Image (tube, grey):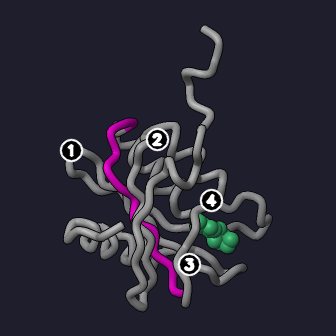
Amino acid sequence: MTLSPGDEDLIRVASLARARAYAPYSTYKVGAAIRTKRNKIHSGANVENVSYGMTVCAERCAAFAAVASGETADWDAIAIVIDDDKLPSPCGACRQVLAEFSPDLRVVLATTSGLRDATTLRALLPDPFLPDRLPR
Ligand code: THU
């Protein structure tokens, strides 16, 4: 999928967030930024903990920042940035959390060295478990 100038803007915000990642244990710093249809951007970085299991990924930090700002739907895109020789791949837990709010999200993948790709959350998480599956 081709990238738009708006995607590059989102990647820049995700890169700035990545610089604030707290990842002393893995040293794997990740930045994420979500653009909503109201054109607001919410960013996040991974936050690790000495107990390891309490770690929260960058994608979920960005998602929760959007929710905490009152934006719980209609997200356009998320950009995810790492410093590696291959593109990032959001973990399964983050795919599920993103699907809760915007199952048709565009997912922009980037590295600090300039690798780029774009895909969709539908491609990354086909047949997601969504609220309409719960009995009413
Ligand atoms: N991590 C993310 O922030 N996003 C991902 O998509 C994959 C993994 C974080 C969690 C942990 O702090 C570090 O990367 C190594 O797993």
Of pointers 3 and 2, the one earlier in the residue sequence: 3
Q: CA distance from mark 4 to mark 1?
A: 26 Å
- Label 4: state its secondary structure: loop
Sort mark 2 into few (<14), some (14-19) or many (20+) by Cα contacts within 10 Å: many
Residue bearing the label numbered 3: 29
- Of badges 3 and 2, nearer the viewer stands 2
Q: Is residue 47 visible?
A: no
Q: Which residues are magenta?
A: 72-84
Q: CA distance from mark 1 to mark 3?
A: 28 Å
Q: Is mark 3 within 8 Å of ligand 1?
A: yes
Residue bearing the label numbered 2: 103
Of pointers 4 and 3, the one earlier in the residue sequence: 3
Q: CA distance from mark 4 to mark 3?
A: 12 Å
Of pointers 1 and 3, the one earlier in the residue sequence: 3
Of pointers 1 and 2, the one earlier in the residue sequence: 1
- Label 1: state its secondary structure: loop
- Label 2: state its secondary structure: loop
Q: Is mark 4 within 8 Å of ligand 1?
A: yes
- Of badges 4 and 2, nearer the viewer stands 2
Residue at 60%, 38% (x, y): give it.
127
- Of badges 1 and 2, nearer the viewer stands 2
- Amino acid on which the number 2 mark rests in the picture: Pro
Find residue 102 and report its image quarter: top left
Residue at 45%, 62% (x, y): give it.
44
Q: Which mark is residue 56?
A: 4
- Amino acid on which the number 3 mark rests in the picture: Lys
Q: Which mark is residue 38?
A: 1
Q: Are marks 1 and 2 in contact (CB under 8 Å)?
A: no
